[in-house]
């Protein structure tokens, strides 16, 4: 069970690392974090692709710091409530995907499948890469799998 530290509501770094508080739910925080990323994707999807990718890249780089700082402050590497990595992973999954609720749902399902089951090299990275980069990179790899599957689905559809 996920215990949400009170610092999430007092410290902006923790609030963002916990996905604007969505990681504070007592069960399945990664799923709720991914769900919380969908409205932002809806807004971001209106941007030209270059701007979208730039914002996602900045979110990844800032996320390394957010997740590392929060993890160190809490004394727990990759606390289950840290879900900024799910936000960024979902946004990568949805890169260059025109917004529709059907696509948003498929992207959500695909990203969660790859994030939960962690096929190689995701599981390897999850276990061996430390710090904020380690927290972020397994979700980026899951997102690459999900993005590839998403675009294959779009191509075939």
Image (tube, helix red, strand yellow):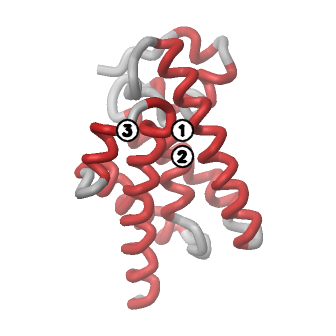
Asked if labels 1 and 3 touch by Cβ distance under 8 angstroms, the answer is no
Q: Distance between the residues labelled 3 and 1?
A: 17 Å
Between residues 124 and 57, which one lies in front from this camera angle? 124
Q: Where is residue 80 in the image (x, y as percent from the top left)?
A: 38, 28
The residue indicated by pointer 1 is 84
Query: Residue lying farthest top?
Result: 6
Q: Is residue 100 left or right of residue 117?
A: right
Judge depth for marks 3 and 2 and give the one in front: 3
Quadrant where the image shows the C terminus = bottom left
Which numbered tag is attached to residue 129?
Answer: 3
Residue, disc 2: 87
Q: Are the residues flagged by discs 3 and 2 in contact, CB closer than 8 Å? A: no
Q: In this rendered view, identify the residue nearer to me: 31 or 7.
A: 7
Find the residue positioned furthest to the bottom: 156
The structure residue drawn at horizontal position 37% and vertical position 65%, both measured from the top left corner, is 145
Question: What is the x, y in percent for residue 14?
Answer: 59, 21
Q: Earlier in the sequence, mark 3 or mark 1?
A: 1
Q: Which residue is drawn at 53% across and 13% down?
A: 73
| Cβ atoms at labels 1 and 2 below 8 Å apart | yes
Q: How crowded is mark 1: few (under 14 residues within 10 Å), some or many (20 or more)?
A: many
């Amino acid at each position: 069970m996920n215990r949400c530290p009170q610092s999430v509501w007092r410290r902006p770094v923790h609030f963002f690392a916990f996905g604007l508080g969505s990681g504070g739910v007592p069960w399945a925080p990664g799923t709720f974090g991914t769900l919380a990323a969908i409205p932002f994707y809806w807004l971001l999807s209106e941007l030209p692709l270059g701007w979208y990718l730039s914002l996602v890249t900045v979110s990844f780089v800032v996320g390394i710091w957010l997740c590392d700082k929060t993890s160190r402050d809490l004394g727990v590497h990759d606390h289950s409530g840290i879900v900024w990595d799910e936000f960024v992973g979902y946004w990568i999954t949805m890169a260059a995907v025109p917004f529709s609720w059907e696509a948003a749902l498929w992207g959500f399902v695909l990203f969660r499948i790859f994030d939960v089951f962690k096929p190689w090299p995701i599981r390897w990275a999850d276990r061996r890469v430390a710090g904020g980069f380690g927290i972020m990179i397994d979700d980026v790899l899951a997102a690459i799998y999900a993005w590839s599957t998403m675009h294959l689905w779009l191509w075939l559809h």
